[in-house]
Image (cartoon, rainbow, N blue to C red):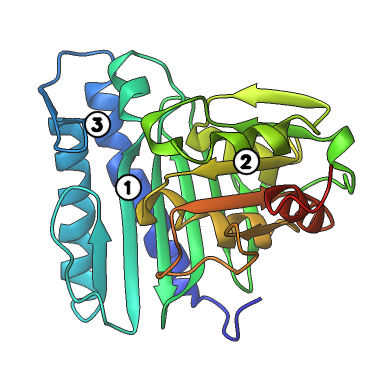
Amino acid sequence: MNAIACPQEFVAFAHKIADAVGEVHRRYFRKSVRMQIKVDASPVTNVDQESEQVMRDMVHKRFPGHGIIGEEFADHQRDAEYVWVIDPIDGTRQFISGKPLFALLLALAHKGEFILGVIDQAILKERWLGADGHGTLYNGSPAHTRRCPSLSRAVLSRPGYDEYTEGRNDVIDRVSAQAQWVEWGITPYDYGLIASGYMDAMINSGPKLWDLAPIDPIIRNAGGKAVDWHGKPLNLESPDHVIVAGDPALIDGILGHINGEQE
């Protein structure tokens, strides 16, 4: 765990952000939205932008000295002691398709290390919040990962063959081939399901900072572990690949398969 506990005022503020953004999500869900395709070929809607602007306005008003990193707008005070990281809709394709598997992802970093994370699915009204010194809560009740030290007994989430996994598909295949059960196609929901003990592990390639930022505090404070493919803890400088395990004992085995050290 990080050296400091997350101040209670930040935990309460994170809930307020999730409440406010959730209202935006519910107002537009399964309604007509404006969509554009970004340079990286991913879709963006007016709902993504409005959701992020709500969050930015709240941070600017309450904590003007804090930084903000978000998917839709330019970084603000990225070198601040405290930095909020937001993905206003992780799973925009699911949102556009009317599937309630998207979520708000929100994180807070202190001196580059994540100390708070939120996954909020506003349509199903499910929220995971993990914060150092507070544990991980699912809708206000403690969430805990489950014990599963062997990959051969694990339920694993993995991406499909997408443009962002190119060059790494063989590694992902090697890991997933060892799992007892594989779920294809990663959504933000999977992180919460690992934290609550319904799934055991995830391997992913290509997530941006705002995609991976909440994972560490949510999973770690529920009893699990999240690292990059080098085995290093996630932080503001992490590369675009991640391993999540509900049981920390799974990490070494997964890393072994990534590095070709196990057959």
Name which of mark 1 and mark 3 comes first in the sequence: 3
Q: Are marks 1 and 3 in contact (CB under 8 Å)?
A: no
Q: Nearer the viewer, residue 94 or 39?
A: 39
Q: Residue 135's x, y, as percent?
A: 66, 63
Specify the quadrant that holds the C terminus: top right
At a point 52% along the width and 41% down the height, the residue shown is 168
At a point 87% along the width and 44% down the height, the residue shown is 148
Q: Nearer the viewer, mark 2 or mark 3?
A: 2
Question: Label 2: few (<14), some or many (≥20) within 10 Å?
Answer: some
Q: Which mark is residue 27?
A: none
Is residue 81 shown left or right of residue 229?
left
Q: Residue 41's x, y, as percent?
A: 21, 30
Task: Report the Cα–Cα distance between label 2 and label 1.
Answer: 27 Å
Is residue 18 shown left or right of residue 202?
left
Q: Residue 25's x, y, as percent?
A: 29, 31
> Which three-letter amino acid code belongs to the residue tagged 3?
Ser
Name which of mark 2 and mark 1 comes first in the sequence: 1
Q: Are marks 2 and 1 in contact (CB under 8 Å)?
A: no
| Residue pointed to by mark 2 | 171
Q: Image quadrant of residue 189? A: top right
| Residue pointed to by mark 1 | 87
At a point 44% along the width and 53% down the height, the residue shown is 240
| Residue pointed to by mark 3 | 42
Specify the quadrant that holds the N terminus: bottom right
